[in-house]
Image (cartoon, grey):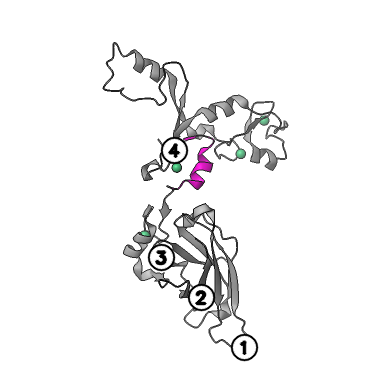
Amino acid sequence: MNGTGMMKQSTKKARTAPVIGGRPDVPRGRGEETVEESANAYTVEADGLGCEICFEPFGDQIFMCKNGHPACGTCCIRMDRICFCAEPIGDIRCRPLEKVLAAMTRPCTYASYGCREIVSYTGRRSHEEDCPYTPYYCPFDGCTYHGMQLYNHIHDRHAASAVVVPTGSRRVAVRLEKKMPFRVLLHGDGARVFLLLNGGEVLSGRSLSLVCMSPRPMGKAEARYKMEVKHWRSAPDTPVLLSSGAAPLVRRLKDFQARGFLFVPDSYWNIGDTVSVTVHLTDGW
Ligand SMILES: [Zn+2]
Ligand SMILES: [Zn+2]
Ligand SMILES: [Zn+2]
Ligand SMILES: [Zn+2]
């Protein structure tokens, strides 16, 4: 049902969910119930329900100008509370539309992965950000795997490209080539997948950071780490580069923007354009 929502209007006889084709165990006279149910269920194109300015789905609050143009709260602020038609916007709520959207429900997007939640149009995004059934996407280019078993998938399919943190240890040395967008670290606990990201968007060096790809940490605590890069010649005038931070949970690499990183200047990469990065998982779940 992607891309559409169902609107239900409650009446005394309406069931909680529309039934297509009817229940086989209920004898029907002339199909009156089917007629009543289909009269109370509507299919709506989700495309027509977003903010007309940023095209994002509406949240809890919808505003409108005197001319009836609806906008989300973020757009009202972004437009300095002046609608594109030049009327003020941001004070008047569009309550009927808010009410309709709050009443629209559908199963969570990840129902096929096991989630049983029924979410409202407006509550969907906040549920799905935290939904424990959101799949993890394999980060390797060209691989289409997404699911809950990313560790096993990488172990089985991409073992040659992964570095396994020794069991019982929290420290591992990773050889990173300049042209590699990331290296995968498989934790010795048999569950956690980390990526050492090699950001290439910076002049005169690379930016390294660590993210956790799965599983979702308990209580949302992010795993903490320290990272260390030595100059390939280890000369006295070349300091050891150090950073520490929390590894954010990333389910899909292409949507991710790093918050902090360790900058490794070009001079730290050896003639073969590699560095050795020591990653120390300092705590976490
Ligand atoms: Zn908007
Ligand atoms: Zn307007
Ligand atoms: Zn869910
Ligand atoms: Zn894969």
- Image quadrant containing the N terminus: top left
Please give the name of the residue rendered at 53% of the width and 42% of the height, measured from the top-left corner: 126
- Mark 1 or 4, nearer chain start: 4
Is the residue 74 above or below the residue 160 in the image?
above
- Residue 128 in magenta? yes
Q: Looking at the rendered structure, which numbered label has been put on residue 277?
A: 2
Q: CA distance from mark 1 to mark 3?
A: 37 Å
Q: Looking at the rendered structure, which numbered label has been put on residue 189?
A: 3
Q: Residues within 10 Å of mark 3 (few under 14, many from 20)?
A: few
Q: Nearer the viewer, mark 3 or mark 2?
A: 3
- Mark 1 or 2, nearer chain start: 1
- Helix, strand or loop at mark 4: loop
Q: Looking at the rendered structure, which numbered label has been put on residue 236?
A: 1
Is the residue 119 above or below the residue 22 in the image?
below
Question: Disc 3 residue type?
Answer: Asp
> Is ligand 3 within 8 Å of the beta carbon of the residue shown at mark 4?
yes
